[in-house]
Image: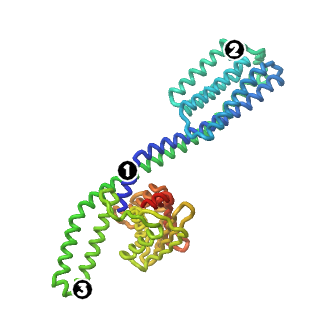
Amino acid sequence: MKITRTATRVTASPQTPLAGSVEADEVAGVKNMQQLIQLRWFAAFGQVATIFVVHFGFGILLPLDAMLAVLTCLVLFNVTSLLYWRTHREVSNGELFIALLVDVGTLTAQLYLSGGATNPFTFLYLLQVTLGAVLLRTWATWTMVGITGACFAGLALFGQPLALPMDYELGLFSPYIEGILICFALNAVLLVVFITRIERNLRQRDARLASLRQRAAEEEHIVRMGLLASGAAHELGTPLATLAVILGDWRRMPTFTDDPELEQEIAEMQAQVQRCKSIVSGILLSAGEARGESSEKTSIRTFLDDLVREWRATRSASALSYENDLVQDFPMVSDSTIKQMICNVLDNAFEASPRSVHLEATHDEDTLTLRVSDAGPGFTPKMLAQFGTPYQSSKGRAGSGLGLFLVVNVARTLGGGVSAGNRSEGGAVVTITLPLSAIVLDEGEAHGS
């Protein structure tokens, strides 16, 4: 029942990995834009300090009014960017390109007002090109190279050199050499700091994309298993129906009615055949190939109580202890997928601990929590490290280990999660968390049902 229903839910949203990859790119883009905004603040403060040191410290006259006006425009642009990207969560390559062009434009204006191509801070163009190589697509990066080269050529053609003595023979005491040294230090520090942060953002994006690819592969695996289960359900329907008819005929034959022991065994066989037919019907129902009365309005408390009663009737009534701590009951539709998911966890606990299985149901404001614990040997460290991946089992049988894998994926499609661990007093515990919004009927649906 669970296998096919899970496949059905996954195939209903085949574009999930693509949507997730777009989301990962958007998150990385916003973080990179925020790094550019921080870098622009550093550039603004650095320009203020440099302008006043050169003008008042070295006595080199600069057009303060024009340079401060350019600086004011840069600050206003950065404030606008800061406010804009607090509410917008999608950054395109073009927007990053424009942001870098603004930086190149303000740098060019300041250099034009302070010596043109002879200003030692022209090497800051390399910082912009490097940031473009990291953040932008190939065409935008090469465009940035061309624009910065054209800006440098324009400064050489139209810029007015400052009355700045080179004094190369003075070494580090030469104002020009000191300017180049400061420019080098700024380039080096800013590149190390911000490229490291940007690379971290890109690594996080790549990790997110790898996780999405893994999830897509797992969901594809579930789809294949769902198709296999659906086909098997169709094939099993006919022989099970034949067995049910034959057993019904046997039970009416005098040979069996006269022997109470044989009659009891046939009744048990009929019960097991009926259980197999219910499982097959559940598979087809979950696959959307049949519709019956099983999808009916109920409540969470009633749903769990009925589930426990059915489980005890077919396994062991004394093995399972049940604690329903739901303070408030909520309307829901009986869901065979959730039912089979919980039964799967209970079955695994029962195999590990046939005498002691405990199910506890609680909820907070928006989450239903189901905790299944047992007194068995618990999970090995390897199983905990790979929990939720297919074919991880301690049973040693070929093909085993799919139960918890499907439980994890069913919970994930509902927006919940599954965690596992070992209890300090011995045994294992599996915790299923499901958002109430995914399983509870809202007020309108509840009355409409």
Crowd band around label 3 with a 10 angstrom C-alpha radius: few (<14), some (14–19), many (20+): few
At label 2, the amino acid type is Gly
Q: Are marks 1 and 3 in contact (CB under 8 Å)?
A: no
Q: Nearer the viewer, residue 109 or 411?
A: 411
* Residue 159: assigned label: 2
Instruction: Please give the residue where the numbered disc 3 appears in the rendered image.
Output: 261
- Residue depicted at 33% across the width and 56% down the height: 288
Q: Position of residue 191 (x, y in %)?
A: 64, 34
Q: Where is residue 266 in the image (x, y as percent from the top left)?
A: 23, 79
Distance from disc 1 to disc 3, alpha carbons, whole Å, reads 49 Å
Disc 1, SS = helix
In front: label 3 or label 2: 3
- Residue depicted at 39% across the width and 59% down the height: 391
- Residue depicted at 42% across the width and 59% down the height: 405
Observer able to see residue 147: yes
Disc 2, SS = loop
Disc 3, SS = helix
Q: Residue furthest left?
A: 254
